Image (cartoon, grey):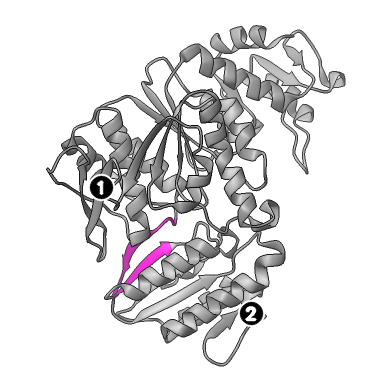
Amino acid sequence: MNSSHIYTLFLASIGVCTDTRKITPGSIFFALKGDNFNGNAFAAKAIEQGCSYAVIDEPEFAKGDNYIVVEDVLTALQNLATEHRRALKTPIIGVTGSNGKTTTKELLRSVLSQKLETYATIGNLNNQIGVPLTLLGLTPKHQIAIIEMGASKPGDIKELADIAEPDFGLITSIGKAHLEGMGGIDGVVKTKGELFDFIRNNKGGVFVDSSNDMLKTVLAGIDRIVTYGESEQSNYIGEITASEPFLSIKWRSSYSPQWHTAESNLTGDYNFSNIMSAVAVGNHFGLSPQEIAAGIAAYTPDNNRAQFVKKGTNTLILDAYNANPTSMEASIRNFYQQDFPNKTLVLGEMMELGSFSDTEHRHILALVQSLGFTYVHFVGNQFYSLKNGTFHFWENASLLADYFKENKPQNSTILFKGSRKNRLESVAEVI
């Protein structure tokens, strides 16, 4: 069965699903495979629970006319998403980067929603399965869409861009993320640059932080470039006006002396670029300064992404959804610069660094020592192997949580930063 016929069936359906635990009657089940499961084996259950069709790639599981056999289910899902994207012609902004993807995506959603019917990636559905599922949620009412794209190895962003076919691209940052799969920082630049490669080949537009020198290498041949940042040469020029505890900025366009202000619920000067990207995108799509400011102010981070939480006499900065050497260093340096009482660091090990792991963890330890922090807890095996008599080292978060149960901090400001695998939020819960 060709993709056009599947698309016809999709238009008559409720939508698609990939998990028999979350079946919506009238939807089409796509029998995806994973390392530990074979979706084909669940196709019959999906039909029993009300799916109109099941798309499979192993013919022996077909048990009737409502089983659609394709060569590869994931490819069929991706092709369906691209066909749907082309049919609707919704303008799409593709967002990728080593740090700040989700924050930027949510800022753009909040800002653009002040004027336009805006659709964006839900949660962290930013991979080869998540992006097509996101695209298939588009409807004719949506006036613009923001699609987040993640990568762990070269070629990932190219594949996602080919599926989503974005009209605009935004790379939030280039940093030391997924070094194991990328093979080093040059691999990160090349992989993130795959988004701009698609934009260049299809005459689209990009939004660029003018201070990010690494992005200059991937801009060649792109004609439609909107820049933002502190530089006077930017199309949209901004300055931080306050940063304790939340960032406030002022900004103006290069063709006007009139300054405008915006207040956010984001901590950390490193979020300045993310806020300015929302300013640039908002302006490009015709929003007023007041609408842009309202959208920036309306976004409050959640899900352990730079959350600012008061617990008793303590203030917690929960930034424990993800971490890499670049974001870790930025968070520590920013925390050091803030005028908070009784600063405490809780730092979890960073994942997917491969042969770079020991060097990068040693660098973070040396950084903390050089800045003179007194109260520091390192969590995870990578840090534990470097333990010394200066700070606290814990093999896992559970042990640190037990420590805090008996040694409750008081009147402290505590930064939690680490990769998701550390589960540092479990430590925060006991404070």
Residue type, label 2: Tyr
Residue 250: x and y in percent read 19, 51
Labelled disc at residue 394: none
Badge 1: residue crowd in 10 Å (few <14, some 14–19, many ≥20): many
Q: CA distance from mark 2 to mark 1?
A: 43 Å
Q: Quadrant of residue 280?
A: top left
Q: Is residue 380 visible?
A: no
Image marks 2 and 1: residues in contact by CB distance under 8 Å = no
Residue at the image point whose x is 43% and y is 71% from the top: 332
Residue at the image point whose x is 61% and y is 11% from the top: 7
Q: Is residue 201 visible?
A: yes
Q: If you read the primary sequence from the N terminus, does the residue marked by circle 2 or circle 1 appear first? A: 1
Q: Secondary structure at mark 2?
A: helix
Residue 176: x and y in percent read 57, 59
Residue at the image point whose x is 43% and y is 52% from the top: 212
The span shown in magenta is: 304-318
Q: Nearer the viewer, residue 286 or 106?
A: 286
Labelled disc at residue 237: 1
**Figure check: 349 above or below 257:** below
Q: Which residue is mark 2?
A: 384
Residue type, label 1: Ile
